Image (cartoon, rainbow, N blue to C red):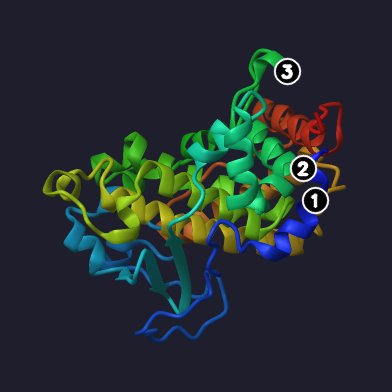
Amino acid sequence: MHLLRFLPLLSFFFIGCNQTPDHAKLSSPGNCFSNSLVNDDTTGTETYTTGRGALLGTRFSSFEDLKSVIQIEYDSNIVFVRHCTNGREVVSVLETGTSQGDMAKAGNDGALWDRLLLLFSCPYAVINRNDLKRIYTLSRWRPDWLGEGDLAFFDMAKSSVGNINTPEMAFKNVRDSTEKGYLNSFNHITAQAFITSCFSEELADFIADSHERYRHPELITGKFTEAQITDLEEGPVDNYVDLINNEWGQELGKYLKEKYSIDRETNWTPELLANYLNDLQRYYSWAFQIGFEPFRPEDKEVLRFSNKINIVMKGRLNFNT
């Protein structure tokens, strides 16, 4: 008997994964009125410190400093993280549930018990296993499948950092040039935007949450050690910023999905990918008040990554095995 054939039925009996919609309200919702991602041209010290929309973890000197910009509310194994800026709000909801580690244990070479456990605890992950494999391939270097020089979401984010052409404005804070500066923020936003555009916001959110709850379960309870609180590189400052940037990435992904009519059958030409990446850079330019050199269709990384998206989404790789 093949258990997977019963997945559609099982999904009705198990909530699975404890996925609380991110539009769930906080007890103190605040006031955000605009529906525009880029809705003003104001500048100033506050904007430099916090950004508009997307956040840079390197701009915060402490956990208390971050909490002056975002709202965090813990409630019985669930945390709501809210960011309201320039009239627009995002809310990240993280709770206990299936983690990235659970899915890795139940992978193709996993023990039968681990696979059954995932089936019953999170049928959503099993039902969407082929898309999760596709996203994993886009998120990792796979030279064994796609040849030497294969690229991933990280490389697109790194290229955007390399495209910054106003270093005097971008790097007033030397920490912004480190891995936890623009690179980390761009990486989270880039990956979440692409996953949302190519698949769905729900799947993007599932992946983001399973990653965060695996690496840092304390984010859900707020029970941090003093060492964690003061660790600006890997502690709650870094990770709550990641949660917020994931949400901004999803918002951008929805916007660009509609703008370019992206679906599973989209042909990712170098022109489309360059336009998509330049729109992400326009958002970064607005959020952090910095300038960029544009991506061009003939750029090597654009040619390679557009080819990879097409192969993964509708090409020769078989994700049904």
Q: Residue at x 68, y 14 (%)?
A: 144
Q: Secondary structure at mark 1?
A: helix
The crowd level at tag 3 (other Cα within 10 Å; few <14, some 14-19, many 20+) is few
Q: Amino acid at mark 2?
A: Leu
Estimate how packed mark 2 is, as few (under 14), some (14 to 19) or many (20 or more) residues with alpha carbons within 10 Å.
few
Q: Which circle, 1 or 3, is nearer the viewer?
A: 1
> From where the camera sits, is residue 48 visible?
no
What type is the residue that disc 3 sits on? Trp
Q: Residue at x 23, y 54 (%)?
A: 60
- In the rendered structure, find residue 6 and report the number of the disc placed on it: 1
| Marks 1,3: beta carbons within 8 A | no
Please, which residue is most extreme toward the left here?
226
Quick check: 168 left or right of 150? left
The alpha-carbon separation of the residues under discs 1 and 2 comes to: 6 Å
Q: Residue at x 64, y 60 (%)?
A: 201
Query: Which residue is identified by label 2?
Result: 3
Q: Which residue matches tag 3? A: 145
In the image: residue 144, left or right of residue 178:
right
Q: Are marks 1 and 2 in contact (CB under 8 Å)?
A: yes
